[in-house]
Amino acid sequence: MTRRSFFSVGGAAIAGSALKVPAGGDITGSRTRQGSDDKIKKYVTLGRTGFQVSDIAVGGVPLRDTAVVRHAYEKGINYFDLGESYGRGAAERAVGEAMPYMERDKIFITTKVGVGDNDTVDTILDRFRRCKERLQTEYIDAFYMHGVTSVAALSNAAFHTATDRLKADGQIRFIGLSCHGPGRGGDSLEDVLLAAVEDGRFDQFLFTYNFLNSEVGDKVLAACKEKNIGTTAMKTKPGSLPPTPFDPDNPTEQQAQMIERNINRGRTREQAIQGIRGQIQRQEETYQNTRPFLEKYGITTQEELDLASIHWVVQNPDMHTACVSSNSLDIIDKVVPLSGTTMTPVEMDVLREYGQVISSQYCRHGCSTCAEACPHDLPVSTIMRYAYYYECQGREKEAMVKYAGLDDGDASLCMACDAPCRGACPYGIDVQANLLEAHSRLTL
Ligand code: SF4
Ligand code: SF4
């Protein structure tokens, strides 16, 4: 089956990603096909900001088309989650071009900059100015520290001095942060977010939350509720990497390299081939297991599973809004009917069974449990997140560039490794096989 997700791809070109099972059931309910008349039905108070936010928001990673922004606004979506790095400013530009068509005080704009040790007050102010210019607005509702990886980074003096000045000038109203979990040697997602709650200066958060990755998120949501912090979700659907088929007589470049490296380590060619076969077989078995589940519910597209995953987040009253990455009018039309609704028992059953099938394939964003078992200290979670961008968000080029830019080692090290990480994942993920799949996709 084609597992590339419908949702975060810029455009509707792969709306029909077909699962090869007979049609016949209806898991997402008729509401997702109600058409273009639907509007947002539920608005929630976004923590201490007091803003009444739509329970579904536009996530700006793939956003490029200003018509999508205007369409979302007409549908009642009033929150746009942006960042200077999203399309190198293109997402901000798309919202900026739509600005004359929207009532400014009826929308909430968030944008972000990654803040490093080399940043100064001036560099942050300069980057903020450019964000604001692209957005064609006098003020940003919330300015975020992007991708925070350590508790220490929360106290970055340059960021806080700059944001204090911007607040005093009326150029920003609130500050926030986004967190994907640790980089090498960083702190866990849980530690970072709970420390940020205690810090008291951050008014809202953006973090990973989906039905297979909610344990830490639920703790964070409870802490945010107590301090009245705004909560926004990203990566609202899990994803996994399908195995690359293996033909020993015609291996891919990566597979040939893997055979070569194993031979160099004293293994026979046959042993090397058996090793690769074993890995691919384990992954294939998982995918084959999806068949009865899909047939039972008559699921024919990945889109249905994605919608159900997003719906699970939307219905959580403690998550103020779910950011759905989108650059497509069609996607907006499909998610808006989920607003203000709760899942049916059948939809919940679908997610439970879907979760059982892919649990041992989905590397949880923000987790780093297995990294300790790796003698090379590979940033497993980061590499798998880039693979998610590539496979599930249609961000191939960007993911490959990010992977090439990793300065703490890449997954080629897994090729001839005896895998002491085996068994280290509490979810049963084959760390080595997944990293090798990630490497073959992400290598430029
Ligand atoms: S493979 Fe498992 S333990 Fe390792 S980062 Fe992913 S979810 Fe966590
Ligand atoms: S297989 Fe990869 S992740 Fe596992 S221990 Fe070896 S190098 Fe580290």
Image: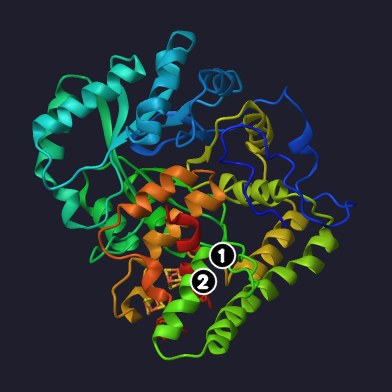
Q: From the viewer's perspective, tell me whether residue 423 is left or right of residue 202.
A: right
**Residue at point 47% right, 90% down?**
267
Q: Quadrant of the N terminus?
A: bottom right
Frontmost residue, 86 versus 443: 443
Disc number placed over residue 256 in the picture, else none: 2
Q: From the viewer's perspective, tell me whether residue 85 is left or right of residue 326.
A: left
Amino acid type, residue under disc 1 in the picture: Thr
Q: From the viewer's perspective, tell me whether residue 176 is left or right of residue 43.
A: left
Amino acid type, residue under disc 2 in the picture: Ala
Disc number placed over residue 175 in the picture, else none: none
The residue sitting at the front extreme is 249
Answer whether labels 1 and 2 touch (C-beta < 8 Å): yes
When the figure is inspected, residue 8 is found, relative to residue 438, above or below; the finding is above
Identify the secondary structure beneath mark 1. loop
Question: Residue 163: horizontal and vertical position, in percent?
Answer: 17, 32
When the figure is inspected, residue 228 is found, relative to residue 422, above or below; the finding is above
**Residue at point 27% right, 27% down?**
173
Q: Is mark 1 within 8 Å of ligand 2?
A: no
Identify the secondary structure beneath mark 2. helix
The residue sitting at the top extreme is 100
